[in-house]
Image (tube, rainbow, N blue to C red):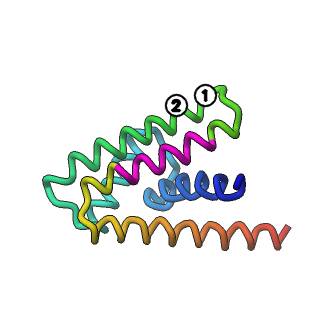
Amino acid sequence: MKKNIFIAVIAALLFSITVSGQKMGDAAERSTKLTEWMRINLNLTDEQLPAVRDINLKYAKKMDALKTSSLPKSEKMKQITDNDKAKDKELKDVLTNSQFQTYLSKKQEIKKKFKENLKQRHQAA
C-alpha cells in the first residue's frame, strides 16, 4: 500500500517535471507548462483551455503548500494521492473521453518510465 502511494506521488511529480522538461519552478510556472503540454498533446479547444489552466494551477498550488507543510510524510503522501485523484476527476469533467484517455495513458507511460529508471538506479547502486 505504501509503495503504491509512493509511486503515485513520484508519478505526479514526474509528470510535472517531464512535461516541463526543466526545473519544476513555482506553481504558476509548472501549471502553465503543463497546460501548454496538454493544449498541444490533447488538442484542447479554446473553451477547454481556461478550465484546464485553472485546474492545473489549483493543484500546483496545493502541491506547493504540501511541500512547505509540517505534516508527517504519510499524511502528505495521502493528500498528494487524494489531490491527484480529485484533479483527474475535475479534468474528466472538462476533457472529452478521448482526451482523458490520452491523458491517463501518458500518466501511465511516465509511471512506467519512472519505475524502470528507479529499478536501474537501484541495480547500479
Magenta-colored span: 77-89
Judge left or right: residue 45 versus residue 107: left
Judge left or right: residue 24 versus residue 34: right
From the top left corner, tell me how far across and down residue 48 is, in percent: 19, 54
Judge left or right: residue 102 versus residue 78: left
Q: Amino acid at mark 1?
A: Ser
If the image is split into quadrants, where does the N terminus sit?
bottom right
Q: For residue 74, which quarter of the picture?
A: top right
Relative vertical location of residue 31 with respect to residue 20 in this rendering, above or below: above
Q: Nearer the viewer, residue 77 or 28?
A: 77
Judge left or right: residue 18 versus residue 102: right
From the top left corner, tell me how far across and down residue 112 is, in percent: 59, 72
Extreme right residue here? 125
Residue at 38% x, 46% y: name it. Answer: 31
Residue at 56% x, 40% y: name it. Answer: 79
From the top left corner, tell me how far across and down residue 100 is, in percent: 33, 65
Q: Is residue 78 magenta?
A: yes
- Label annotation for residue 20: none
Helix, strand or loop at mark 1: loop
Q: Amino acid at mark 2?
A: Ala
Q: Is residue 4 magenta?
A: no
The dominant secondary structure in magenta is: helix
Relative vertical location of residue 38 with respect to residue 74 in this rendering, above or below: below
Q: Mark 1 sits on what residue? A: 69
Q: Mark 2 sits on what residue? A: 65
Q: For residue 46, which quarter of the picture?
A: bottom left
Residue at 16% x, 60% y: name it. Answer: 45
Relative vertical location of residue 101 with respect to residue 45 in this rendering, above or below: below
Helix, strand or loop at mark 2: helix
CA gap, disc 1 to disc 2?
6 Å
Local packing at callout 1 (Cα closer than 10 Å; few below 14, some 14-19, many 20+) is: few
Q: For the residues labelled 1 and 2, say whether their Cβ atoms are less than 8 Å apart.
A: yes
